[in-house]
Image: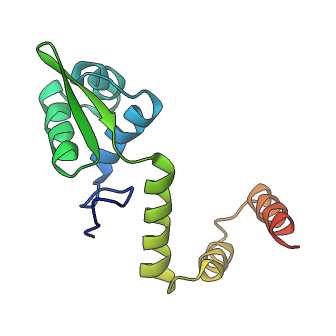
Amino acid sequence: MVVSPSDDSPGERITEAEHAVMEVLWERPRLTAAEVCEALCAVRGWSLPTVKTLLARLVSKGALAAEPDGRRYLYTPLIARAAYVEGESRRLLDRLFGGRAASLVAHLAESEALSAEDLAEIEALLKELRP
């Protein structure tokens, strides 16, 4: 998906690995590559060069800013997490369910993917949305 620079989303799709990096930076912006690696490398089995590659890709996609700080860079998200989630949710609905949220909920219910707690939360949300 290509978006205009005024949109609050990257110009190219973010991969699953890049998304993991974004989650770290949404939680704590202005981190160095080494600090991102501290948060992810052990859990993901990555190395610092892997993280640096992912950060460079995210900068080139317009998802992150890289601010020089001496001999290192501080990375900050240029897109808000909420805007990213909204875009990905819309894309999923459009691609798999014809843009209809009801079809998604029906699919989840039919596949028994919704717990009693999930159903209660959905019912509460619907009550809030109704006038």
Q: Seen from this angle, which residue lies furthest top? A: 70
Scheme of image coloration: rainbow
Instruction: Determine the residue positioned at 36% across, 41% down.
Output: 22
Residue 107, percent from left and from top: 61, 78
Q: Is residue 58 above or below residue 116?
A: above
Q: In the picture, residue 20 is in which quadrant?
A: top left
Q: Seen from this angle, which residue lies furthest bottom? A: 98
Q: Is residue 84 above or below residue 68?
A: below
Q: In the picture, residue 10 is in which quadrant?
A: bottom left
Instruction: Determine the residue positioned at 17% across, 25% down.
Output: 48
Instruction: Determine the residue positioned at 49% across, 66% down.
Output: 89
Q: Is residue 66 above or below residue 129?
A: above
Residue 31, percent from left and from top: 31, 23
Residue 26, percent from left and from top: 43, 36
Residue 110, percent from left and from top: 66, 78
14 left or right of 127 in image: left
Q: Is residue 84 above or below residue 28?
A: below
The foreground one among 78 and 18 is: 78
The foreground one among 108 and 39 is: 39
Q: Quadrant of the N terminus?
A: bottom left
Q: In the picture, residue 87 is in which quadrant?
A: bottom left
How many discs appear? 0
Instruction: Determine the residue positioned at 43% across, 27% down.
Output: 28
